[in-house]
Image (spheres, helix red, strand yellow):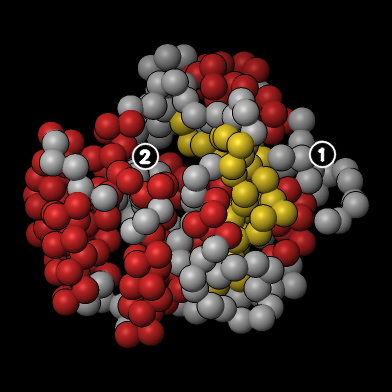
Amino acid sequence: MTTRTGPDDRTTVVVITHNRREELLRTLGLLRRLPERPPVIVTDNASTDGTAEAVARNFPEMTLLRPGRNLGAIGRNLAVQRVRTPYVAFCDDDTWWAPGSLRRAADLLDPRPRLAAVTARILVEPGGTEDPVVPELRDSPLTGPDWLPGPALGSFLAAATVLRTEAFRAAGGFHPGLWLGGEEELLACDLQRQGWWLAYAGELTVHHHASRLRDSTARRVLGLRNTLWFTWLRRPLLPALRRTGHLIRTVPRDAASARAFAHATAGLPWVLRQRDPVPPDLERRIATLERARRDSPARRYVG
């Protein structure tokens, strides 16, 4: 781990938020105190609880974007248009980067021009325990070149990842059709298709104090819907059929799953118009990751 301290001008932090004023203010306070002193851009997705006004009043040095409607993950795309640093670190209003991690992420990315992203170890607060997804990242079944700083990944978690700004823009950012909920999978696929690599870096740390305002059922609906849409946007026909059949057999048989499948079916016309299956080598990586995830406790929302 590097011992350098003080400001670091290589990374901008982007935060999206919606109606979580107090949690956002806590997160921004922690980001303000980071030794790297990163520029911070906040996209307020049409909050109605005074979020934008509180940010403008308490954090005038931060850039505040107010698109006037809830853009979901696309609020990050809007923010990245303003980024002038080589790297962009995403976090949510209930996550924050540990001191020194942004500097170390930039140190990992600097000498590796084909590395698009590094994903951090996630600690769940207030106890500081590892998030259930961490073993899945640390024990990734994917292989990659020797120069990667850690295990190769097939996807990433936006709230715990530093991305190369150039790569994010080249891949088109987050797809507007998915809005929010597992939206990273499609972007990660498109990055890999362009020859970029993703890696886990356990020496980086992000803290997550799950919002009390989170609607877990709504997020499960969106996550399952987007899993289905990603499947039909990028996977070849037979794997897409197998994946869909597996989900039908294994997801909970409840109203949330029924809504997810109904929403996914309603979106099929645009999904099929934009369908662009990946080549065989990338499909093999996706299939390998799919098999490894089936027993992951972090993936129960999809089966």
Residue 72: give its label: 2
Which residue type does callout 2 highlight? Gly
Which residue is located at x 13 percent, y 41 percent? 253
Q: Position of residue 220 (x, y in %)?
A: 28, 39
Query: Which comes sooner in the sequence, label 1 or label 2?
Result: 1
Camera-side residue: 246 or 75? 246
Which residue is located at x 61 percent, y 75 percent? 114
- In the image, residue 244 sits, relative to residue 69, either above or below, namely below
- Total marks placed: 2
Q: Position of residue 262 (x, y in %)?
A: 9, 45
Which residue type does callout 1 highlight? Pro
Task: Note whether residue 166 is visible.
Answer: no
Q: Which residue is label 1 attached to? A: 35
Which residue is located at x 14 percent, y 55 percent? 249
Instruction: Say what secondary structure mark 2 lies in.
Output: loop
Camera-side residue: 27 or 87? 27
Task: Note whether residue 203 is visible.
Answer: yes
Q: Position of residue 73 (x, y in %)?
A: 40, 44
Image-based side of 43 in relation to 85, left or right: left
> What is the distance, in whole Å, between disc 1 and disc 2 at their CAs?
29 Å
Q: Quadrant of residue 246?
A: bottom left
Q: Quadrant of residue 241?
A: bottom left
Residue 12: give its label: none
Dot 2, crowdedness within 10 Å: few (<14), some or many (≥20)? many
Which residue is located at x 25 percent, y 72 percent? 235
